[in-house]
Amino acid sequence: MADGVVVEPLLQLLEKADGGLDSLQVATGLRVDHQLVVGAVKSLQSLGEVISAEQRSSKRWELSCEGKEIAEQGSHEARVFNSVPPEGLAQSQLMNLPSGKVGFSKAMSNKWIRLDKNAEGGPRVYRVVESIEDLVQKKLLLAQQGQTDSLEEKDKNELKKRKLLNEVNVKSYWITKGSAFSTSVTKQETDLTPEMISSGSWHDKKFKPYNFEALGIIPDCGHLHPLMKVRTQFRQIFLEMGFTEMPTNNFIESSFWNFDALFQPQQHPARDQHDTFFLSDPACANHFPEDYLERVKRVHSEGGYGSQGYKYDWKIEEAAKNILRTHTTAVSARMLYRLAQQEEFTPVKYFSIDRVFRNETLDATHLAEFHQIEGVVADYGLTLGDLMGILHQFFTKLGITKLRFKPAYNPYTEPSMEVFSYHEGLQKWVEVGNSGVFRPEMLLPMGLPEGVSVIAWGLSLERPTMIKYGINNIRELVGHKVHLQMVYDSPVCRLDC
């Protein structure tokens, strides 16, 4: 029964009433929930002076769920007494009964039963009296029937202490007739339409008063995707560590900056169409720093700077091919080359967080488009120890303190390390990033001084986001299967530092 359906019966009862009505009595008389009557009262109040309603507050006693069960089945102590046969019952068996633990102590204090600890076969419980009167059940039945006045105050308090009876505050309304009382209610208009104005019919209509205190509908607005929330937190960590953000707005790179400048050979499997997206229009780039291009060509094909190179016929046609960048290390290469062109070298700390693209087979943990987080530090005399130290500082700020380093291979770093962290939930060590010291074959052709070392590390953005928000399938995080409600409901990211 909706609020509107209660309105007319309420007005009819009020017309016959002598003085007024209590909303609780109305609910009982109409056999409806009290809240429906409250809703009807508020609806009538909004119509003007049809009724007057004064809010009242009263206290009453209600049985708890356990109290209702005892009123129906008997108290725990009574059930324990009735479970004990004349020949007695082993205490261990009694304690396994549903009411055993609570009922045993109560029945013992009532002196209904006794415990013989020296009985053969272990402690045994016997009846002390022939029969009992379950006063607890009787008192609860009186309370259930609304006869709490017949109970003494100590009885109420005892039942309340046992959480069988609760004292609750009940808010109700004392309803009386208003100056414009009527048993039939005309619906008030809520909108003034152009038709009402043109015809003049608005003169004969009653309008609902405008409620200036009512809250308006919350307008739809944009929400940050979980990836962007985690990205913001990572970015803040880099900035706190004194890093400068690199520009990463060029998704399209030439193979030269993406591979060749990083001393990655042209026959490397990563440069195959199965791993990289190649562009057809424009297919090739045509602007390169000529002197730098020649030095890169020489170190690949002939060697130099203490390296014997790869000893193959390096081709500009391969280097010129345009691709969707496979990593943001291509941006690091551009920034380091720009740094090398300065008249005087200055130490730098760079970072970037942006999208990269790889020709991956899509599954629960792989996408063709994802994010890479990268940190780069360039200075004189940097060592593997410096890399491990700054990695420890970086991951500590992420809330990751248990770290291990494992030797690895990358074409453009030597030495290289994979970073592992102990995952408390999985109870095992999991890879969280990759790192290394950029090779001289990559740095010296750029023009950087010989004593300058560059340390770098990277990790994905998607993996920590999935862990943070409990997402098991990456396609639920990115793509057309994303549930928008998840985006709305996800809280602001706070990495556990």
Image (spheres, rainbow, N blue to C red):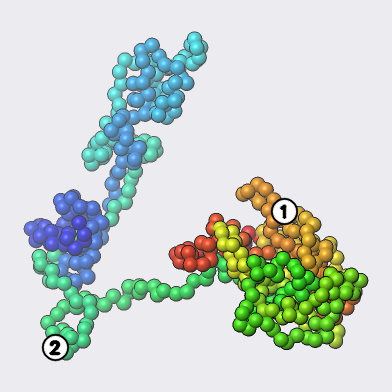
Please identify the quarter of the rendering in which residue 474 is found. Answer: bottom right
| Tag 2 residue | 199
Up/down of 203 relative to 91, above or below: below
Please identify the quarter of the rendering in which residue 247 is found. Answer: bottom right
Q: Nearer the viewer, residue 2 or 476?
A: 476
**At 12% across and 82% down in the image, what residue appears?**
204
Q: Position of residue 195 (x, y in %)?
A: 18, 86
Q: Nearer the viewer, residue 364 or 109?
A: 364
Q: What is the C-alpha distance between the residues marked 2 and 1? A: 79 Å
Label 1 element class: loop
**At 77% across and 75% down in the image, what residue appears?**
260
Amino acid, disc 2? Ser
Q: Nearer the viewer, residue 153 or 148?
A: 148
Indicate the quadrant containing the N terminus: top left, top right, bottom left or bottom right: bottom left
Q: Position of residue 166 (x, y in %)?
A: 34, 43
Q: Which mark is residue 218?
A: none
Label 2 element class: helix
Up/down of 120 relative to 426, above or below: above
Q: Which mark is residue 402?
A: 1
Residues at marks 2 and 1 touching, judged by CB atoms closer than 8 Å: no
